[in-house]
Image (cartoon, grey):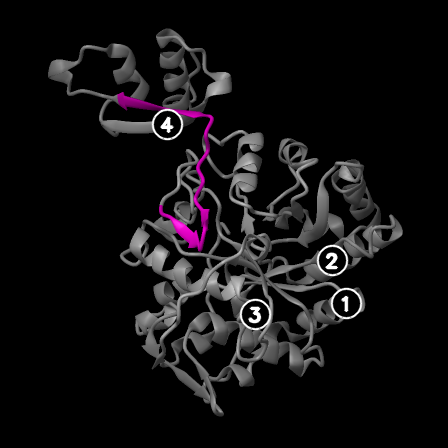
Amino acid sequence: MNRRRKQSPITNSAVVFIIISAVSFFADEVSALGVNWGTMATHQLPPKTVVQMFKDNNIKKVKLFDADTDTMGALAGSGIEVMVAIPNDLLEAMGNYQRAKDWVQRNVSRFNFNDGVKIKYVAVGNEPFLSSYNGSYINLTYPALFNIQTALNDAGYGDFIKATVPLNADVYNSPPDNQVPSAGRFRSDILQEMTLIVNFLAQNKAPFTVNIYPFLSLYLTSDFPFDYAFFDGQNTINDNGVIYTNVFDANFDTLLASLNALNHGDMEVIVGEVGWPTDGDKNANVPNAERFYSGLLPRLSNNVGTPMRKSYIEVYLFGFIDEDAKSVAPGNFERHWGIFKFDGQAKFPVGFGDEWLGVPSHDTMRLHMFSPPSHSNPSKNISVATGPGETQFTVISVPLSSLARTLAMASIAAFEAVYEPKHGFKC
């Protein structure tokens, strides 16, 4: 999620007091939880390290934003279900069937062997209908979806690998004079494209994928009721006798109503992204993130569902690890969505009863570098590594496997980790 979107207008509705009882978690239920693995970082943890973190945290599903060879190689043999992805800048090319067929050969067939990568979905684009794209991908998305699924079918994968389009939650809304989930409809300006996509997904028994961000509802709407972004608030909306206590449920059910209006109300829906950032905004902090996940995860584990669909929902948390190279144009919080810091350390404990999502990486070394004031500068090397006038204290993470256990090599590694990405200078 490197871009921002408006959430459905349903998010402006008011909310009631509800007590959510404590729930216990079981490892087999937790295994259904998925995470997004983004790699927009200046210094990424080795893919094998991240995959081991998935295993340590009992994560059995992962959603990618590409099909990087090193990433796929690390996932091979892990048994983790994978959603690979076609970036938006390839959508036009995928409108050509031969190009789509070649993509499937390179990124699906190549990894489809015994103990290979357990690919379950192919994400065709990522939020291609965002308003910030000015319609660039509206006419490219359906042809790409059609060709990729057709190529999967022709290769013999169609029964167990499905193409889907992760869409932002503003592709549907409720009318201004009836802001309730049951009135949800796809936006009129993209209704033709959405109808084609939904019908094709249904024809191929593929899921609809949507990204829902209560944080963004709060961030983008000045009068949004704060507690309605969480699962333990005191505001509600009454939809013809159905009480909604949080925007996640209301948003999800607005989508179900929109699908129902196209005669596909029973379509499987995946929540491709949902999460809460921990820095970069007054509401982006660890306590709020803990509060959000402490409300969301018990509901997922116990298959509470929503008022319109009281059953299991496949969900991918966004994100697994912070990405410090993402653009902050959408907001300063953009680099802080991870449950884990960029060095693989957990930000806060997320409980699953006896299980915890927060087992850190165990094979990284943390280097603490100080750039002392110029009047007491005992080490020109370290001063150069951080750069004059830059942050006085920097923490970086270097894999033990690639770091020689000598002070000299550690200094070089520190220099390369901090200075090179900023200035392009090599040792």
Residue under numbered circle 3: 171
Q: Which residues are magenta?
A: 348-369
SS for dot 3: helix
Alpha carbon of mark 1 to alpha carbon of mark 2: how far? 9 Å
Dot 2 and dot 3 residues touching (CB under 8 Å)? no
Report the amino acid beneath label 2: Leu
The answer to if 367 sits in the magenta stretch is yes
The C terminus sits in image quarter: top left
Report the amino acid beneath label 3: Val
* Residue 9, image x, y percentages: 45, 76
- Answer with mark 1 or mark 2, whichever residue precedes in sequence: 2
Q: Callout 4: few (<14), some (14-19), or many (20+) C-alpha neighbours within 10 Å?
A: some
Alpha carbon of mark 4 to alpha carbon of mark 1: how far? 46 Å
* Residue sitting at x 23%, y 21%: 371
- Answer with mark 4 or mark 1, whichever residue precedes in sequence: 1
Residue under numbered circle 2: 145
Residue under numbered circle 4: 396
User: In this view, which residue lies farthest toward the left?
Assistant: 375
- Answer with mark 3 or mark 1, whichever residue precedes in sequence: 3
* Residue 375, image x, y percentages: 11, 15
Looking at the image, residue 1 lies above or below residue 386: below
Looking at the image, residue 126 lies above or below residue 210: above
